[in-house]
Amino acid sequence: MGKVRVRFAPSPTGALHIGGVRTCLYNYLFAKQNGGELIFRIEDTDSTRFVPGAEQYIIESLEWLGIKFDEGVSYGGDHGPYRQSERRDIYRKYVDQLLESGHAYIAFDTAAELEAKRNEIKNFQYDATTRMQMRNSLTMSAAEVKNLIDNGEKYVVRVLIEPNEEIIVHDLIRGDVHVNSSILDDKVLYKSADNLPTYHLANIVDDHLMEVTYVIRGEEWLPSAPLHVLLYRYFGWEESMPQFAHLALLLKPDGNGKLSKRDGDRLGFPVFPLEWHDPKTGDISSGYRESGYLPEAVINFLALLGWNPGNDQELMTMDDLVRLFSLERCSKAGAKFDFEKGKWFNKEYLQLADNHRIALMMMKDIEAAGIHADISMVEDVVKYMKSRVSLIKELWPLCSFFWIAPTGFDEKAVAKRWKPETHSMMCELREKAAAWEDYSDIEGFESYMKAWCEEKGYGLGNVMNPFRLMLVGELKGPAMFELTSILGKEETLRRIDYALSKLN
């Protein structure tokens, strides 16, 4: 087998689920580690489920996360087109090949006829035991089949599965999976109604023609793997069949079962990379980007859901992940989606991030509040306050007092910290603060004010707590003289004057 080539092939049926992002990430890491290539393909053969905007949403999501493709939709390449809906003529050739070789047949059963058969036969399956009871080219003459097709009768092409054959799926994560063909049904491979193949045929043909060497996909596709193995055999492509790796599911944070959007809605965390506006329902679903996560934190978090590096390292850059990743260390068991751990990762990456970068993100919330802010001030706020939050969106509610002066004061804080002698003490503080010029000299201003407190015999807590209360309106914020350095002399004195007029 030549160069490693893997693919990520989502369907444009809505927002990209975080489980799909993890699948794409593992494909990316595997490709980069092996000097290979990652293909981006759109599987849009089911026209009834197409959602406008979904394809662009998927592309934007993966670009935000830093996952780069080597070829595919919007990237170009030598194996296009990369949308399955644009490959109709290619697939038809392979449908005809299966029909001519006797590995597929034409079926005319209507939806009503199939439903009637399901009502007649419990657990009905279209297979070797039932197909001779149905309307298909196995039970009809060639002339009848031709006549129906010529008259425009809609039909499907089904794969013909011979019973009692052992099929072995060689899986790099799960080992050899043995399946008896008798449990498989004659899946539909092609529908004349829209002249398109189903996932099963298109997937195999595309992987072969695009020279895919490894198929890394979710556990939910494992039941289709035996059919795919058979199709490779029927086409005579066994020597070029890719190696399979089926990733374990992402599980609910609590209880059992696969992680769903409802879990995110119920517990308050996103399950999509970006905010999604459903064009059909109008519903808006939260995204990691809009919720204040950094893409590198999301990548690090996702990588460790179902894989471990073999050491105790938790914080890993994309380069680290490429170097350490291996399919052998992917778990067979599902991974609980610990969204609190995701917040922990984000908090860690926030501390490492450049303050200017975080300030630009915070600026969006500041502007949304109708406030014009200087970016250098926002950077200073971020520098002193980012250690107190896990998500970028938490910064504005925590730090709004830097731009919005208090008009009221926390009653409990006033009752506890504003004593009868406090007003005169704060009037003296106001004089001392007015006499100091360089508020950017944090250490100098702090030493100056502490020396005054010591000289007057004032307890430091009895001065600094009311001082903070005057500037913020409550007892929160960064270190006292970090706060004054950001507010500056003019604004500090203005807030002191307002507080003294209200707390007399």
Image (cartoon, rainbow, N blue to C red):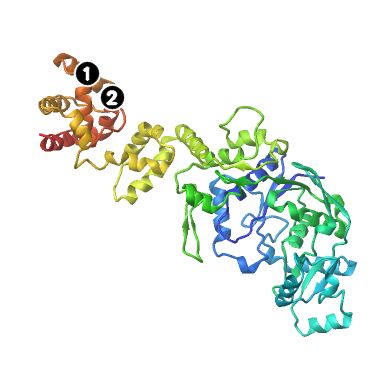
Give the residue at x 86% y 56%: 233
The C terminus lies in which quarter of the figure? Answer: top left
Residue 5 place in picture, x, y as percent:
73, 47
Q: Is residue 380 left or right of 434 when viewed as pictured? A: right
Give the residue at x 47% y 61%: 283
Residue 171 place in picture, x, y as percent:
78, 45
Give the residue at x 48% y 47%: 267
The tag on residue 442 is 2
Q: Which residue is mark 1?
A: 450
Q: Is residue 347 above or below residue 169?
A: above
Q: Is residue 94 above or below residue 442?
A: below
Q: Is residue 411 left or right of 371 when viewed as pictured? A: left
The label nearer to you, 1 versus 2, is 1
Q: Amino acid at mark 2?
A: Ile
CA neighbours of label 1 inside 10 A, class few (<14), some (14 to 19), many (20+): some
Point out the tag, 1 or 2, that comes first from the N-terminus: 2
* Mark 2 secondary-structure assignment: helix
Please tell me which residue lies in front, 484 or 460.
460
Please identify the quarter of the rendering in which residue 390 is found. Answer: top left
Q: Amino acid at mark 1?
A: Lys
Please identify the quarter of the rendering in which residue 417 is found. Answer: top left
* Mark 1 secondary-structure assignment: helix
